[in-house]
Amino acid sequence: LVKLNFGATVHRVVRVELDDAAFVPGDTALAPAWQVEWQALLPTLQSTPSILRLAYRQSGAPPELVQRRLKALRQDMGDYWHALGNAYPLQIEEEILEVMP
């Protein structure tokens, strides 16, 4: 008789959809209204193991700016998460959606 013990967890996906309007024009900083919403995600992420998916709807910003913005968001959330004590390893995914004309 062989006994296998293993644990499996199912993480929920918290999807945040962004576009160019969520940022200060030409910059990687979130617009003030979005900054409040961004920080409000923390209790949601802490409550249950989750995957944070950043879905960026590209609608005019150059691709290199989009990449810098996503990198800044990942860093920002990583800093917040570290300050809260890393309840679990937070996985952050990125998705770039192209707007069709």
Image: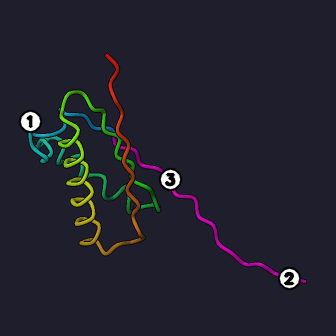
Let me know if residue 39 appears in the view: no
The residue carrying mark 3 is: 12
For the rendered model, the colour scheme is rainbow
Of all residues, the one furthest to the right in this rendering is: 1
The residue carrying mark 2 is: 2
Res. 25 mark: 1
Q: Is residue 66 magenta?
A: no
Q: Nearer the viewer, mark 1 or mark 3?
A: 1
Marks 1 and 3 sit apart, C-alpha to C-alpha, by: 32 Å
What residue type is disc 3 on? Arg
Q: Quadrant of residue 71?
A: bottom left
- Give the side of residue 23 with respect to residue 73, left or right: left
Res. 6 mark: none
Which of 75/9 is in front?
75
User: Mark 2: few, some, or many residues within 10 Å (few <14, many ≥20)?
Assistant: few
User: Mark 1: few, some, or many residues within 10 Å (few <14, many ≥20)?
Assistant: few
Look at the numbered disc 1 and give the secondary structure of its residue. loop
Q: Are marks 2 and 1 in contact (CB under 8 Å)?
A: no
At which x and y percent is residue 70? 25, 49
User: Mark 3: few, some, or many residues within 10 Å (few <14, many ≥20)?
Assistant: few
Q: Where the N terminus falls, by quadrant?
A: bottom right
Residue at left 17%, top 48%? 35
- Give the side of residue 49 with respect to residue 30, left or right: right
Q: Where the C terminus falls, by quadrant?
A: top left
What residue type is disc 2 on? Val
Look at the numbered disc 3 and give the secondary structure of its residue. strand
Q: Which residues are magenta?
A: 1-16
Precedes in sequence: disc 1 or disc 3: 3
What residue type is disc 1 on? Pro
Precedes in sequence: disc 2 or disc 1: 2
Marks 2 and 1 sit apart, C-alpha to C-alpha, by: 61 Å
Predominant SS along the magenta part: loop
